[in-house]
Image (cartoon, helix red, strand yellow):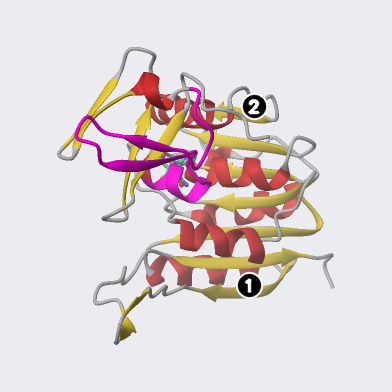
Amino acid sequence: MTRPIAEGESVILLDIEDNKEFFYLMRAKGHINLHKGKILHAEVIGKHEGAVVRTSKGNPFLVFRPTLFQYIMHMKRDTSIIYPKDLALILFYSDIYPGSTCLEAGIGSGALTLTLLRAVGPLGKVISYEVRPEFIERAQKNVQLLLGETPNLEVKQRDIYEGIEEQGLDRICLDIPEPWRVVKNAAESLLPGGIFTSYLPTIIQVKSLVDALREEKRFTSIQTMETLLRDWHIEGLSVRPAHRMVGHTGFLTVARKGDLP
Ligand SMILES: C[S@@+](CC[C@H](N)C(=O)[O-])C[C@H]1O[C@@H](n2cnc3c(N)ncnc32)[C@H](O)[C@@H]1O
């Protein structure tokens, strides 16, 4: 049995003919005006995922709950976010696992927060440092809209360059401009075997970070990578890479904490 779509949830409406998706928050009295006609929210509320709804002009759309990928791409953002291709890489290379305690900075619009919350699960914990209150508000709204109440998320309005209050952390994930300023404190706060991850847009920043990680002798297995994701177009005899792709997002650097030799 699938749970029917409820008021207050966000949904994806997929135009079956054009394979185009639209993202809306369902309100009892709301309506959607598309060039293919009008859909009342009331017609979507109560439907199961995958159900067909028709516009006032009779065009069919499919109703889905957004995947985490879709939600992140459609949610409101006040900052740049980490894109799903890089979030996927972070989950695996940082080895985020159910029950783990992860600290992130800064929260931004909450894309990484949502991804970490899903991966650590209800038995894990995410602690998020952010300096700007307006971004905390935005990210918390984004989290609430998708996940509802999240007692395992602790958000602190705090500058991570001034120190990390927590000890015994399993993972630290940073999306801030000067992560090298956090390396010493991260080494103190991570458990042995803990993993430090940083996402950075330029390679000059990466160089400063890697130098700091090498200098702090407790970090090992330092690895920097980027991911280039290319879609393929497959239709009839036109079987080729997509013409457009995202050329650059950011670099991921990962390091593991051990004892001093
Ligand atoms: C690019 S945004 C993060 C985006 C976020 N990872 C996401 O996926 O939505 C960078 C954030 O770091 C915050 N920030 C910058 N320096 C910080 C610091 N020293 N301590 C805490 N947060 C900081 C900024 O205010 C901003 O919200």
Q: Judge left or right: residue 6 versus residue 62.
A: right
Q: Secondary structure at mark 1?
A: helix
Residue 236 percent coordinates (x, y): 30, 82
Residue visible at 61% across and 40% down? 163
Q: Which residues are magenta?
A: 46-73
Q: Secondary structure at mark 2?
A: loop
Question: Is 160 a magenta residue?
Answer: no
Q: Which residue is farthest top?
A: 29
Q: Which residue is farthest front?
A: 58
Among the two numbered marks 2 and 1 on one chain, the one whose residue lies closer to the N terminus: 2
Q: Judge left or right: residue 197 versus residue 52.
A: right
Above/below status of 252 relative to 27 = below
Q: Is mark 1 within 8 Å of ligand 1?
A: no
Q: Judge left or right: residue 225 versus residue 93.
A: left
Above/below status of 227 relative to 172 = below
Q: Judge left or right: residue 94 versus residue 31.
A: right
- Looking at the picture, which amino acid does disc 2 mark? Thr
Residue 115 percent coordinates (x, y): 58, 47
Q: Quadrant of the N terminus?
A: top right
- Tell me the number on the disc at residue 214: 1
Residue visible at 52% across and 75% down? 225
- Quarter of the image where one finds residue 162: top right
Residue visible at 43% across and 47% down? 70
- Looking at the picture, which amino acid does disc 1 mark? Arg
Of residue 147 and residue 215, the one placed in the foreground of this image is 147
- Tell me the number on the disc at residue 150: 2
- Of tags 2 and 1, which is closer to the observer? 2
Of residue 1 and residue 97, the one placed in the foreground of this image is 1
Above/below status of 150 relative to 112 = above
- Tell me the number on the disc at residue 79: none
